[in-house]
Amino acid sequence: MCGIFGYMGSSNAPDIIHQGLKRLEYRGYDSWGISTIENGKIKTTKDVGHLPEKSPIESKSVSTGVGHTRWATHGGVTITNAHPHYSTDNSFVIAQNGIVENYTELKKSLENLGYVFKTQVDTEVIVKLVEHERKSSKTLRDALVKAFKQLDGRNTVIVLDSKQDQILAIRNGSPLILGTKEKDVYLASDPLAFNQYSQNIVEINNGELIEIKDNKYKIYDIYSEKYINRKPREEKQLDIEINKGDYDHYMIKEIVEQKGTILKSTNYSQKELKPLVDRLKKSKSIYTIGAGTAGYSADQIAYYLRKIANLNAISIKSYETESYLNLIDKNDTVIAVSQSGETADTLEAIEILKKQGVYISSIINMPGSTLSRLSDSFFMSNAGSEICVASTKVFTSQISFGYLLSKTVIGKYKEAKKEIYLLSTNLEDFFNNKTFKQIEKITKVLKDKEHFFILGKGQNFHIAQEGALKIKEISYKHFEGFAAGELKHGVIALIEKGTPVISIISNDSNVRDLISATQEVKARGAITIGIGDKQDENCFDYFITVADSNELKSISNVIPFQLISYYLAKELGNNIDKPRNLAKSVTVK
Ligand code: M6R
């Protein structure tokens, strides 16, 4: 959460930073700020809410600056709290991505030393600490290093210094990538932010400080106190188109793209899969790990590994790994699932497991991410950039890969490839105006309701949970997805006349249980909606028939939920691609 950007070069800095922040806005859009050095002084423009479409700064002769897009952690969403934050003498500004976990203690001791705080943000503690350390340090760099070493948490900071006409940045936990092109140097929370200008990237590791001065960069290890020579490498995969095309929103574009992305994510040969497949067969247990939608992918992949590949697979939520740590060892394999590869909860779990000697394989969508560097092996989801905060195409890419992997374990690679291809073809037919109109019509019935329930079982249990998350995120309505078997154990108490209940009905061994559960809620006055391939006219008030598939029903079944989410949010006039309070990449705990 929060995006940081820095630029020194031959082009107009405010425009470059504005464009970079626009691409980083998925990381938070509570407020934004851009600081540049003009005639030896720092000039800052800030505001709350989304960045304007056009650069808000007119100057044409400015070559150095930094920017920040905020997802609020400490302190309300106000202009005062928007980053970057000035030093008392206005000679430098600092912006942060992360949380200073010992903020209260540090603030208290700085106040005791006479420092006066003007904002409620934890970043101001870093500013004051640097000022304090500057008194006994030779350079601002040394003061920054001393201050940084006192911070607890995962925090990456960027500093714009007008005295030395330089940019400094240090990384710990939250991502930082450098880009270069001739006389231009870029720094950002992810490489897509400067991808349109440079594809030559330098990955920055924890504990490394960047100095950008005279259009050149240096990398300094803050622990060994030595400079590091690291040459840029070309990141070809970054050449990703970022536009909405003919669509009104990224979300609908990304939903429709799934007909192609499920193929791309499974475009691996048996030879490429073999090392992981061999490892899985030998592993005592396999743990899949993720959070949010990636957590439901991890659940679904573990389901496939158990059900199809007969392996002992257990899914863990990244933020709940602790109680499993004493069970996992080097005879196990961990599969981490993450779109961004930067989710703090997942990274922290993986860092601990790696120290325990556990083999980590990851499924990641964002090239060059921290998770890819931490993992022993990784597979790209290859879904292309997913701009909408709510994950859609990456979810189906991840679970398609999990399906292919599971079938490969039992020697049915070719069969899986055929099925995925068939589903992709059927999705081509599914995404048509008739489907969109039907779902739009159903959302008109739903829009005035507040509580909704989704029932699933077996292959559709985690799909019910992911379906509910998807709709909650964008519509702000209370959707709850659970195993149909759970209904009679309590949830049924919430069903009254007019409560919408969506049942996921696949023509599989669970169909009767789902029909019975639906009848039970119908008898109590629920509005019943079926999603799947097994229509029952006596049971459902509305039925959405999904794209035909054999064993890949979970994938076809999740798509109507994504569409309900989209059309319901549209009906309610919500911000579809950037829903309130959320950020796409959750780099704080
Ligand atoms: O980048 P990751 O896949 O690790 O992100 C994990 C979650 O934060 C993410 O899936 C989140 O739940 C999305 N908002 C889902 O739509």
Image (cartoon, helix red, strand yellow):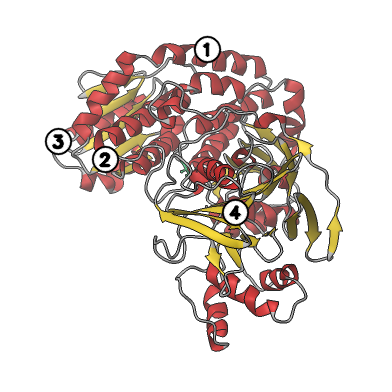
Disc sitting over residue 452 in the figure: 2
Mark earlier in primary sequence (4, 2): 4
Residue 498, quarter of the rendered image: top left
Q: Which residue does the numbered mark 3 point to in the structure image? A: 525
Q: Is residue 516 above or below residue 332?
A: above
Q: Amino acid at mark 4?
A: Val
Q: Which residue does the numbered mark 1 point to in the structure image? A: 422
| Number of the front mark, 3 or 2 | 2
- SS under mark 1: helix
Query: Which residue shows up at 57% across the image and 46% down it?
Result: 17
How many neighbours does mark 3 have within 10 angstroms: few (below 14), some (14-19), or many (20 or more)? some
How many neighbours does mark 4 have within 10 angstroms: few (below 14), some (14-19), or many (20 or more)? many
Residue 308 in sight = no
Query: Which residue shows up at 61% across the image and 53% down it?
Result: 65
Mark pair 4, 2: CA separation: 44 Å
Mark earlier in primary sequence (3, 4): 4
Q: Are marks 3 and 2 in contact (CB under 8 Å)?
A: no
Horizontal side, residue 222 vs residue 250: left or right: right
Q: Which residue does the numbered mark 4 point to in the structure image? A: 66
Closer to us: 105 or 292: 105
Q: Is mark 3 within 8 Å of ligand 1?
A: no
